[in-house]
Amino acid sequence: MSENIRVRFAPSPTGKVHIGNIRAAIYNWLFARHTGGKFLLRVEDTDLERSTPEAIEVLFDCMKWLGLDWDEEVFYQTKNVKRHLEVVDQLLKSGHAYKVERTSRDGKTGVVTMFKMPKEGVIEFDDIVKGHMAKKAEDIQDFAIVRSDGSPIFHIANVVDDIDQRVTHIIRGDDHVENTFKHICIFRALGASVPKYGHLSMIVNQQGKPYSKRDGAAFVGEYREQGYLPEALFNYLLLLGWNPGDDREVLTREEMVKLFELEKVHVTAAMFDPKKLAWMNGEYIKKIPHADFVKELKARAGAVQRDEAWWDYLADQLQPRTKFLNDIPAAVACFVSDDYPFDEKAVDKRLRKPGVKALLKDLVERFSKAPEWNAPALEALVKELSQGNGMGPWVHPIRVAVSGRGEGIGLFEMLQLLGREKTIARLESAAERFAG
RNA sequence: GGCCCCUUCGUCUAUCGGCUAGGACAUCUGGUUCUCAUCCAGGUAAGAGGAGUUCGACUCUCCUAGGGGCUGCCA
């Protein structure tokens, strides 16, 4: 493979980065890193309304969050407008373009510059992912390249920028396939070499339609806010249309770079499955180094003063069962404050039952007298009470009383972390408040 | 309507003429556990339909059906 390979990610900043779009970035990045080529970033900021500095910042943030580092300086399309128009002049002179008065859809009338399509012949190219593509020139109409206000249109800007950035491979969404036939004609009219193309299928929803904001989180920022790890999103998006050829699914970045091949990217549209992404996220959370997880935990738990051993222990209990970092606050609420919320359903099921009050009172007695306060000792204590018939009748009410929830880390580990004093106080309080 | 593309379990996919069609997620069952969002074991579940080529087609060809994309002075 050549080290001259140059690819680009060329989004138009709108303040949000769509997952389909970022997947294109991922594939470009991987292709560049795999082949030792350059991954360029071009900001197609010609829509002045939407391409605000803030929107561009959002784009950079998403890229950085996912670890998509780019080579060379960011290329801004607006800075190349002069060049675009020079090239249009060139096309006008060579007879590949002409001016004409037209009325647009919204009723504007004015003179636009049109690119003149060849009238016969077949335009063809070998798409790296879709294979051989061909279309009769006569099936494509002449198209506008300069608006009546004198501003260049996407088709010409895109092609000129690709020439100027010396892009060798254009990897982009499937929705650009038709444009490619047009763009190839522009490259040829300019005597420029035509880059190689690879068109990526779309990410679709359960109905098979392009995945949009109505289908759930469609933008990178939303996944970040919901506590997804960038590595998990990256890995999941990569697998939507590519696989390493064996059964591996959770891959390190190094493995991805080593194994990624554009030729093996799928042609068919892939349905987005939030459940598998969630699973993938859990896998990556398990892989977080202990010390880092403790840091996350502390950051999300709020201000609580405990010693390191206490945090270590809680982290060990929590990490394997955490699927989303955003679940942490609810999971640790009972450790953070004595004013933790009670889940009404759990309370109904486990506390508002006859006999529970007496049971809790009895436990308060026994816990007060317990010689040791640690998980194994407490478990032994309750096991003895249950006489081998299952600890459920004791465990469930205790759990809801001290944590307000029906699920969480192991109960006895939880009691150990809470300490004797809090445990007893909470059992007493719950007995008065809820139990019958 | 016209043009281009696609079609293996519910979903993501393996298979590149030999298949008892494999894996993962989801789902179900059983086990472990106090619970579960952990862990272990197992199960259900697929080649759109029809012709042809071939000793043999999920794999190659054609047709049909279904799906998607494009058809802008958007990108």
Image: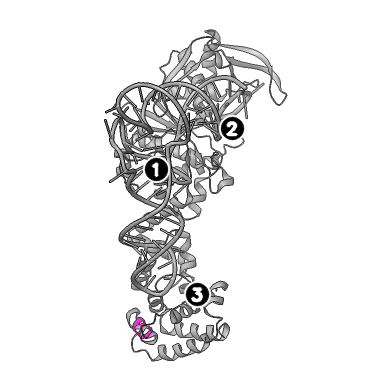
Q: Give the range drawn in magenta.
A: A378-382
Measured Cα–Cα span from mark 2 to mark 3: 50 Å
Q: Residue at x 50, y 89 (%)?
A: A358
Residue A184 % position (x, y): 47, 18
State the image coordinates of residue A326 (x, y, percent, origin top left).
Answer: 48, 60
Q: Earlier in the sequence, mark 1 or mark 3?
A: 1
The answer to whether any part of residue A240 appears in the image is no
Q: Nearer the viewer, residue B63 or A58?
A: B63
In the rendered image, which residue does mark 2 sit on?
A: A47
Visible in this render: residue A405? yes
At a point 53% along the width and 48% down the height, the residue shown is A217
Name the residue: 62% across, 12% down.
Answer: A99
**Is A97 one of the magenta-colored residues?**
no
Of the residues under marks 2 and 1, which one precedes in the sequence? 2
Residue A115 on image: x %, y %: 56, 15
Do discs 2 and 3 share a chain? yes
Bin the neighbour count of mark 3 within 10 Å (Cα to Cα): few under 14, some 14-19, many 20 and up.
Answer: few
The kind of residue tagged 2 is Asp
User: Dot 1 falls on which chain?
Assistant: A
Mark 2, mark 1: which one is toward the viewer? 1
Q: Which numbered dot is residue A337?
A: 3
Q: In which quarter of the image is residue A9?
A: top left
Q: What element carries label 2?
A: loop
What is the count of numbered marks?
3
Which kind of residue does numbered mark 3 sit on?
A: Ser
Most foreground residue, A84 or A398: A398
Position of the C terminus of chain A by quadrant = bottom right
SS state under label 3? loop
Q: Mark 1 points at which residue?
A: A239
Q: Which chain carries label 2?
A: A
